[in-house]
Image: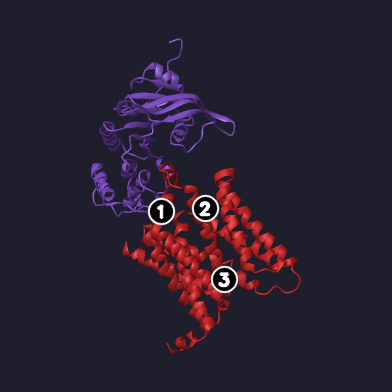
Amino acid sequence: MNEIIELLSFSFFRNALIAATLTSLIAGIIGSYIVARRNVFISGGITHASFGGMGIAYYLGFPPFVGAAIFAVLSAVGIEWSSNKAGIREDSSIAILWSLGMAIGILFVFLTPGYTPNLMGFLFGDILTVQMLDLIWLAVISIICIALLKFFYPTVLSVAFNSEFAQVSGLPVQAIKYISAILVAMAIVLSIKVMGIILVLSLFTIPASAANLFSKDLKKMMINSVIISVIGSVSGLLIAYYLDLPSGATIIFTLTISYGILRVVKLFKY
Amino acid sequence: MKPLVQVHNITAAYDNNVVLSNVNLDVNENDFIGIIGPNGGGKTTLLKIIIELLKPASGVIKKDPNLKIGYLPQVNSIDKQFPITIRDVILSGRFVNDKWWSKPSKQTLQKVDELLEFIGLKNVHNMPIGELSGGQMQRIFLCRALMSNPNLLILDEPNTYVDKTFEASLYNLLGELNKDMAILLVSHDVGTISSMVKTIACVNGGLHYHHSNKITNEVLQSYNCPIELVSHGHVPHRVLKHHEHE
């Protein structure tokens, strides 16, 4: 216990804890939305497409996360648009964006002269280097998510459940779809700092799927998913620190183990 | 009789593939129209044009300014595993009347109770829809369509995944509802539909309207396709139109 208190006196560790908690909060909420709508694959596409923006940002010398955010938002909006308007099959457009993003990223990182700092951090996460600015961004997106759900949950739920019916009822379905696509993209990009491009998808799916074992109501699923995700990430972070392991990968292990435990609990309970 | 919807000379196509051509249909107050036709004949396309999910290639649709549509989509277009409670499913029907940012009023919540009572399901408010049988689910979607007090109820294949007992009770409910609203019902099952509806429209590329619910030879001919007739006996049998020399 004393050791933990001592750890908390380091600002890098405090920042890491806050980042893990806020990321889990966002991932719990947005992840439930993604899992409920069966859109996990879309999130994978957005995540990997963002690597293209990161590569270009490296090459041109501006902050990699700005590049990633631009690519993520554009690909999220692009997938939504292409399946609505251009009549391209959604899984195909996702697969194209997924690999195209990675290809652009690899090319530009290759073309960037000299050493590319922190590239591994972006691929696998680097929670101990989280800055104040990252925390502010995470807090802003958390507040936006919670506020939107506080005020518009019934509308969001109706559109997510049956968008065709919602459109016939006169709800602004397209606007809601695009806004949620942008939010999903921003949530994913901000979580990359903690989890890394390769691993971020699991933070959005494992806690939500675990929550879905017991909650068949989106709101409850979101709340339970946040709880599972915060517990899993914080304990994963502590284990990673003590055993000197990569934090992102360790967090995935703690989350998967908690999913397994809940699965077994469900088996015996029902 | 006041016309609620007037479909005038509608043509619809997907990528130059014409699905409907020169379709005319008036839906008046208190109508109960059964739309029948083979799969791919354009039944659902016609519905989607009426509810404005699709734009016709040409033609006009006139709607009464007071028209309020209650819509029951094909059940297989809905994700049955979606984490949502029955209460929330039914409540989502309120947005026809309510503003999109509004919270449900007390009367609206009470209306949910009344509708559940009407369809004969009790104490199911917090149950997830995934736990319902096909017939129960159809009834819940009927409640959602009725949430807004519509004057036109549009049902797309409401007898899918539904057993015959429930189908009968569904048609009883519809008969009762028809006292207060017009009903437009799409079905591929001609046998059952004809006993309930007042008039029949056959959709197969074009539309043929029949001012009665009798499936006559003329109906079958314009239908121009083998159809399933389910009888009250043991054997469902297939009725084809007569050959010309018979």
| Chain identifier, red in the render | A
Q: Chain of mark 3?
A: A
- The image quadrant where one finds the N terminus of chain B is top left
> Marks 3 and 1, how far apart in space?
29 Å
Question: Farthest front residue?
Answer: B65
Left or right of residue B16: residue A141? left
| Residue type of the residue flagged with mark 2 | Tyr
Residue named by callout 2: A178
Compared to B190, does A209 lie above or below? Answer: below
Report crowding for label 1: few under 14, some 14 to 19, many 20 or more residues within 10 A (C-alpha). many
Q: Horizontal and vertical percent for residue A118?
A: 65, 74
| Chain identifier, purple in the render | B
| Residue type of the residue flagged with mark 1 | Leu
Q: Quadrant of residue B147?
A: top left
| Residue type of the residue flagged with mark 3 | Lys
Q: Secondary structure at mark 1?
A: helix
Residue named by callout 1: A157
Can residue B226 be spotted in the picture? no
Report crowding for label 3: few under 14, some 14 to 19, many 20 or more residues within 10 A (C-alpha). many
Q: Chain of mark 2?
A: A
As rendered, which of A172 and B240 lies closer to the eye? A172
Q: Tell if the residue under mark 3 belongs to the same chain as the one under mark 1.
A: yes
Q: Nearer the viewer, mark 1 or mark 2?
A: 2
Question: Farthest top residue?
Answer: B245
Compared to A240, does B145 lie above or below? Answer: above
Residue named by callout 3: A193
Q: Which residue is rendered at x = 59% and y = 31% of the image?
A: B16
Q: Tell if the residue under mark 1 belongs to the same chain as the one under mark 2.
A: yes
